[in-house]
Image (tube, rainbow, N blue to C red):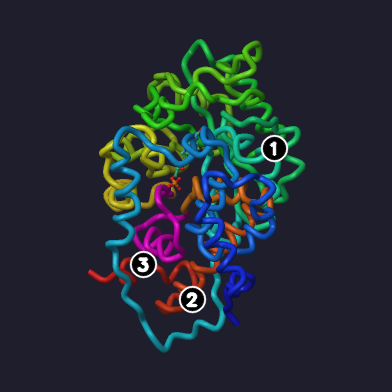
């Protein structure tokens, strides 16, 4: 039977959540709800943000939650999902709901991945190690960012499901360093590389600019060369991630046999070029609204990319996915899988590995419910006809 196990909310839990959301500015840490209580109170992904805000430093919250400029793209990422209506089909046997997918030969219990995000130690002292443990508990593939604050030798043993690894700066002068990172990622069993192609320079991140002087120490990023160990901080928090071209993708393809997936593609012509260059997959993404403000919602960019790619490689999408119905809508528009960013960072802040697990489990259970209530018992049965047009 399909139940939302573990997320039913008692009156007491509701009261705790409301108390956490009130967050008086003079609340002392000792007065705040304990991590396990806070995690217990959350029944949907949105519940994690106020709970996380209570625990994160001001800098960390601004860094995670903010986007570029006026944050219109962040808003549109959500609004676009909200505007899509669903079309149910009744009297279908939905006794069993099968969410399994296969990506690059890797079978996954569900199509929800953890997007690469920088500096998990801002959210939790264990950083990416806790994320890996929490992700694998929920059967989610975790994409380790090159701005990871922990090394793979610590992250990989914590992960029961395979990791992927994200790369940023493929400029020629960085390639010897990147080659070493690629080899290390392969050695620790990573199954795919994601190259982020939408951030040759950082966006106008005004909210981060305002708090940049509050950067905490101890955030070294061993896989990203700009870390300044001497200063004890990562520099720059803002600045160039490196401008490179299709030639750099060809170079990466020449040094690894693992699938190379390009992340941050919104333009169907770029998607076509990516496939012709040899990319094994594409992630339609506007970087969660953190790079170029006023880009459209990524869910609105998905279908034109899917049409152009014409099933040559899998297309994934991220940006604003907060509900199981969002996962369903993304798959209906042609995505093979989705990635989430901020929600799992909030889960990590609230309750470490357990918080990450709970975020994924809630989203997966909501997705199963959405499949059952639209009469789509397996992934194959999800197509455009589940959308109300
Ligand atoms: C990111 N994102 C990101 N992407 C990437 O390719 N490399 C990176 O280092 C980071 N770092 C990063 C840090 C933080 C704090 C956030 C919130 C995001 C973008 C991320 O992979 C993804 O595209 C978005 O987070 C998806 O949008 P949502 O789910 O956060 O709305």
Q: Which of marks 1 and 3 is in front?
A: 1
For the residue carrying disc 2, how many other residues have a C-alpha within 10 Å: few (<14), some (14-19), or many (20+)? many
Task: Name the residue at 59% across, 14% down.
Answer: 176
Q: Which of marks 1 and 2 is in front?
A: 1
Instruction: Depth check: give the residue in front, 231 or 278.
Output: 231
In 3D space, how far apart are the residues under numbered discs 1 and 2 (Cα atoms)?
40 Å
Residue 334 in the magenta stretch? The answer is yes
Q: Residue furthest front?
A: 26
Q: Residue 14 carries which label?
A: none
How many dots with numbers? 3
Rendering coords of residue 180 (x, y %): 64, 21
Q: Which mark is residue 383?
A: 3
Image position of 339 (left or right of 39): left
Task: Name the residue at 27% across, 44% down.
Answer: 296
Q: For the residue labelled by badge 2, is the local secondary structure a helix, a strand or a loop?
A: loop
Q: Which of marks 2 and 3 is nearer the N terminus?
A: 2
Up/down of 251 relative to 160, above or below: above
Q: Which of marks 1 and 2 is nearer the N terminus?
A: 1
Label 3 beta carbon less than 8 Å to ligand 1: no
Query: Which quarter of the figure has residue 71?
Result: top left
Q: Mark 2 points at which residue?
A: 377
Q: Mark 1 points at which residue?
A: 125
Rendering coords of residue 101 (x, y %): 54, 60
Label 1 beta carbon less than 8 Å to ligand 1: no
From which residue to which does the magenta span run? 315-337
Instruction: Depth check: give the residue in front, 245 or 342.
Output: 342
Rendering coords of residue 257 (x, y %): 58, 33
Up/down of 323 relative to 198, above or below: below
For the residue carrying disc 3, how many other residues have a C-alpha within 10 Å: few (<14), some (14-19), or many (20+)? some
Instruction: Depth check: give the residue in front, 280 or 111.
Output: 111
Q: Tell me, yes or no, if residue 315 can be seen here.
A: no
In 3D space, how far apart are the residues under numbered discs 2 and 3 (Cα atoms)?
12 Å
């Amino acid at each position: 039977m399909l139940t939302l196990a573990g997320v039913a909310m008692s009156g007491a839990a509701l009261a705790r959540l409301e108390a956490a959301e009130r967050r008086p500015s003079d609340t002392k840490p000792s007065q705040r709800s304990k991590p396990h209580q806070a995690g217990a109170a959350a029944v949907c992904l949105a519940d994690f943000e106020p709970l996380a805000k209570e625990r994160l430093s001001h800098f960390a919250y601004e860094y995670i939650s903010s986007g570029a400029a006026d944050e219109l793209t962040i808003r549109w990422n959500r609004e676009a999902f909200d505007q899509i209506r669903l079309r149910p089909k009744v009297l279908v046997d939905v006794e069993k709901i099968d969410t399994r997918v296969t990506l690059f030969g890797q079978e996954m219990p569900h199509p929800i991945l953890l997007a690469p995000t920088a500096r998990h130690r801002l959210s939790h002292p264990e950083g990416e190690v806790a994320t890996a443990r929490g992700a694998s508990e929920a059967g989610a593939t975790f994409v380790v960012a090159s701005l990871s604050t922990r090394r793979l030798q610590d992250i990989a043993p914590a992960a029961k499901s395979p990791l992927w690894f994200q790369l940023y700066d493929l400029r020629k002068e960085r390639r010897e360093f990147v080659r070493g990172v690629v080899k290390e990622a392969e050695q620790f069993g990573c199954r795919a590389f994601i190259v982020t192609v939408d951030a040759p320079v950082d966006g106008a991140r005004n909210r981060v600019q305002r708090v940049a002087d509050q950067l905490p120490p101890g955030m070294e990023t061993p896989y990203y060369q700009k870390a300044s160990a001497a200063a004890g901080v990562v520099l720059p928090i803002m600045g160039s991630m490196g401008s490179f071209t299709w030639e750099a993708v060809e170079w990466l393809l020449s040094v690894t046999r693992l699938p190379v997936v390009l992340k941050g593609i919104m333009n169907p012509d770029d998607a076509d070029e990516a496939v012709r260059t040899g990319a094994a997959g594409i992630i339609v993404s506007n970087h969660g609204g953190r790079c170029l403000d006023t880009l459209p919602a990524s869910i609105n960019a998905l279908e034109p990319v899917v049409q152009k790619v014409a099933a040559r490689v899998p297309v994934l999408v991220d940006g604003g996915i907060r509900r199981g119905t969002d996962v369903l809508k993304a798959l209906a528009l042609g995505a093979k899988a989705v990635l989430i960013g901020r929600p799992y960072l909030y889960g990590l802040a609230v309750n470490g590995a357990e918080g990450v697990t709970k975020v994924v489990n809630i989203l997966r259970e909501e997705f199963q419910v959405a499949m059952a209530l639209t009469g789509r018992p397996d992934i194959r049965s999800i197509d455009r006809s589940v959308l109300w047009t």
